[in-house]
Image: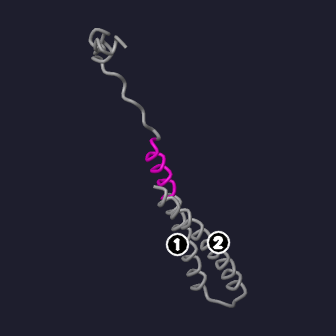
Amino acid sequence: ALVALQGDRRRVDSLQSAAAAAARADTLARQQYQAGLIDFRTVLETQRTLLSAQDSAAGVRASLAADHVALYKALGGGWTPEPPTAEAQSATPSDTVSPSPAQTAR
């Protein structure tokens, strides 16, 4: 669980950087389109790249959350003991094992 967590953290960082770069490229493409320097197809391509990068980053963030849950469970988180059964609750001291005479003589 720790290895998956570390790997996903690195992927989140790199994908967020890629998404930020794609956002800058999209902004520049829009400015160039408004200035008449590029065609609209290029703007659409930069938007597609931006959305793909954002989608990938969101997917890895979801995986990172699942890794946190897996680590929590691996460390015993969420474990609750089962409530005692009716049989165990009704047990009397005479039902339990008593020490042997050799143990009581000590």
Q: Quadrant of the N terminus?
A: bottom left
Direction from residue 20 to residue 4 in the image, left or right: left
- SS at mark 1? helix
- Judging depth in this view, the residue of 78 and 50 nearest the camera is 78
- SS at mark 2? helix
The x and y percentages for residue 8 are 51, 63
Decide whether residue 23 is among the magenta residues.
no
Q: Which residues are magenta?
A: 63-76
- Quadrant of residue 26 in the image? bottom right
Callout 2, which amino acid? Ala
Q: Is residue 14 above or below residue 93?
A: below
- Judging depth in this view, the residue of 14 and 55 nearest the camera is 14
Q: Is residue 65 above or below residue 49?
A: above
The residue that appears at 57% across and 85% down in the rendered structure is: 41
Direction from residue 21 to residue 6 in the image, left or right: left
The x and y percentages for residue 84 are 34, 22
The residue under label 2 is 20
Q: Is residue 5 above or below residue 17?
A: above
Q: CA distance from mark 1 to mark 2?
A: 12 Å
Characterize the local packing of mark 1: few (<14), some (14-19) or many (20 or more) Cα atoms within 10 angstroms.
some
Q: Earlier in the sequence, mark 1 or mark 2?
A: 2
Decide whether residue 65 is among the magenta residues.
yes
